Amino acid sequence: AGWITKMPIREGDALAAGSVIVQVDDRESQTSANELGAQLSGVTAQKNRLQSERRLVSIQIESRLVSERSRMQTAEVTVSALRPQLELARREFERTTKLFTDNVSSRRQLEQSESKLQQLDREYRVAVAEKGSANSRVAEADAEKARLDVLAADLQVLEQKANEIQARIDRQK
């Protein structure tokens, strides 16, 4: 589209195949095509950036999941290792209490037994809390995978924009 700038053929002139009948000023069309090309380049750059971000986020999430699952397993092992020790300390405290009541053991032995029970109980509670916290962090890392879905949707939008711009460029030709 544009203004006719030249008409080398006049009415009644003989025409040969491939002859130019009219010459059109295509500067406006070229400017429009250049603008569309620039838009397409911009959308392509955005797509590339989003693809890189998506790869980075995926790697970060997987790394975090591995780390948090490892922490969770460590906490589970700690809890399972402390459980029998705590039960043993409870039984030992009960036995020492009975022996103290029967005047067979000393107050020092009773206090040591009670102190050990309290220490193991604290360690066990901390380990259980760490296990719960690790479970929560694994769930959070899993939830971050939704961010990958958002990036994928953004990529689809940009792909659609690129296709629309390409179609407009093709119509300009």
Image (spheres, grey):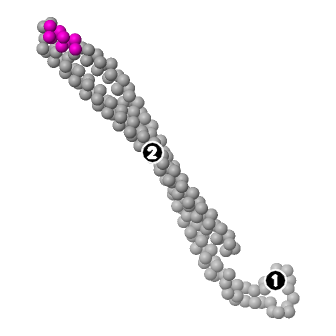
Q: In the rendered view of the protein, which quadrant contains the C terminus?
A: bottom right
> Residue, x 19% and y 19% (percent of image)?
114
Q: Can residue 56 be seen in this view?
A: no
The reply to whether the magenta stretch includes residue 170 is: no
Q: Residue 142, percent across and down? A: 45, 42
- Quarter of the figure with the N terminus: bottom right
Residue type indicated by callout 2: Ala
**Crowd tier of the residue under label 1, counting other residues whose Cα lies within 10 Å: few below 14, some 14–19, many 20 or above:** few
Precedes in sequence: disc 1 or disc 2: 1
Q: What element carries label 2?
A: helix
> Which image quadrant for residue 69?
top left
| Left or right of 19 in this view: 171 | left
Q: Residue 143 carries which label?
A: 2
Residue 37 in the image: x percent, y percent?
60, 70
Calculate the distance from the C-alpha at mark 1 to the C-alpha at mark 2: 66 Å
The residue carrying mark 1 is 19
**Which residue is rendered at x = 45% and y = 37% of the image?**
66
In the picture shown, does residue 76 fall above or below 104?
Answer: below
Q: Are there few (<14), some (14-19), or many (20+) residues within 10 Å of tag 2?
A: few
What's under tag 1, amino acid-wise? Ser
Relative to 81, residue 19 above or below: below
Q: Where is residue 132 in the image (x, y as percent from the top left)?
A: 35, 34
Q: What stretch is highlighted in magenta?
A: 94-102
| Residue 80 occupies quadrant | top left
